[in-house]
Image (cartoon, rainbow, N blue to C red):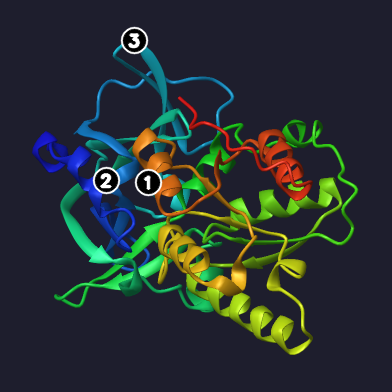
């Protein structure tokens, strides 16, 4: 299985081309439906794939958290994705996908992995409302394979927010209001959890926000605003104070969105902040290379609010990439 990921470093070159590679995996046959669905996770977030090691149970954990394992001296929580997803599978979860988000490492138990698939973000579609409702927002994108299988991209951030402490009320207590009642932040993210956290941060700051589920929807909204601004003789920057964008999104990712904004003179003077759980140095540097003004990791409301306040107040001194 390590062969699947041996060239993962080279895959960072895909970023900025609106392409991605996803690792396909299975959670087992759902006894309720008799089907084995195919799921996907971005390879950028996968550290390794391994046989499930011995798991040590821990008290007072959510039911889908099986316990912990020791990986090279670090304790890593292990989440049974089938259990979490409500899938009544009877087959053992013999494979563990080790992932990393914002420096947080965790293991996901799955029935098995299939292959790594390269595709264009434009092939990833926003799931229909019925599917979103049935899965509680767990699926953020869907694509169809040549063999007619549907692959569902899981909202891993939602999984982590409900099984760990990365999203609790204490995180927002240090957010300081900003005296900018005229400011409006446009933000896009395919994760409902991430959008909610941004909304809570902006609300605590006293800032208005306009949201979108991906880069394509955000770009279309910005074009409408630019057209209106032109009709009333104002620059778009008076109506759009700042753009906050995720990287991974179906139909148009954050890199392509940033390229479009920065190459369009209608949007001159509008800062673009990249807000992502892809916290590797290569992703941050690539964001800066396509014109992103700054990079802020997800699930850090205080740091996000400090960055937004500084930019909204015109303090646009470049900040070095976090190490």
Instruction: Give the structural element (helix, strand or loop) at label 3.
Output: loop
Work out whether mark 2 precedes mark 3 in sequence or the reverse, and give the earlier one. Answer: 2
First in sequence: mark 3 or mark 1? 3
Name the quadrant of the N terminus.
top left
> Callout 3: few (<14), some (14-19), or many (20+) C-alpha neighbours within 10 Å?
few
Q: x, y (%) of residue 156?
A: 45, 48
Q: Quadrant of residue 232?
A: bottom right
Whether 127 is drawn above or below 153: the answer is below
Q: From where the camera sits, is residue 86 visible?
A: no
Can you tell which of label 3 and label 1 is closer to the viewer? 1
How far is mark 2 from mark 3, CA to CA? 27 Å
Does residue 198 appear to the left or right of 322 in the view shown? right
Name the residue that disc number 1 marks.
Answer: 286
The correct choice, above or below, for 279 with respect to 137 in the image is: above
Disc 2, disc 1: CB below 8 Å?
Answer: yes
Q: CA distance from mark 2 to mark 1?
A: 9 Å
Q: Which residue is mark 2?
A: 12
First reached walking from the N terminus: tag 2 or tag 1? 2
Separation (CA) of disc 3 from disc 1? 31 Å
Kindly identify the residue that appears in the image at 39 percent across and 40 percent down: 285
Residue carrying label 3: 73
């Amino acid at each position: 299985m390590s062969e699947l990921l041996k060239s993962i470093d080279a895959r960072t070159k895909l970023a900025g081309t609106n392409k991605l590679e996803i690792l396909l995996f299975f959670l087992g046959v759902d006894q309720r439906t008799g089907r084995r669905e195919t799921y996907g996770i971005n390879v950028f977030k996968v550290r390794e794939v391994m046989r499930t090691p011995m798991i040590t149970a821990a008290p007072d954990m959510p039911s889908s958290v099986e316990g912990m394992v020791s990986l090279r001296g670090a304790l890593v929580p292990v989440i049974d994705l089938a259990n979490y997803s409500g899938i009544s599978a009877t087959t053992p979860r013999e494979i563990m996908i080790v992932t990393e988000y914002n420096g947080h490492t965790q293991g996901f138990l799955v029935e098995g992995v299939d292959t790594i698939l390269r595709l264009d973000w434009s092939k990833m579609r926003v799931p229909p409302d019925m599917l979103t409702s049935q899965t509680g927002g767990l699926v953020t994108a869907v694509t169809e394979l040549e063999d007619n299988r549907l692959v569902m991209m899981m909202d891993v951030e939602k999984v982590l927010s409900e099984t760990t402490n990365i999203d609790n009320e204490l995180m927002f207590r240090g957010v300081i209001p900003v005296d900018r009642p005229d400011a409006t932040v446009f933000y896009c993210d395919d994760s409902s959890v991430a959008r909610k956290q941004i909304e809570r941060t902006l609300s605590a700051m006293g800032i208005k926000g306009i949201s979108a589920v991906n880069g394509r929807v955000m770009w279309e909204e910005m074009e409408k605003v630019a057209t209106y601004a032109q009709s009333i003789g104002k620059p778009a920057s008076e109506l759009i104070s700042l753009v906050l964008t995720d990287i991974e999104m179906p139909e148009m990712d954050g890199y392509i969105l940033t390229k479009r904004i920065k190459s369009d003179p209608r949007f001159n003077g509008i800062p673009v902040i990249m807000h992502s759980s892809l916290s590797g140095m290569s992703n941050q540097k690539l964001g800066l290379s396509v014109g992103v003004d700054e990079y802020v990791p997800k699930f850090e409301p205080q740091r996000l609010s400090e960055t937004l306040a500084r930019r909204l107040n015109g303090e646009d001194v470049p900040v070095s990439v976090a190490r």
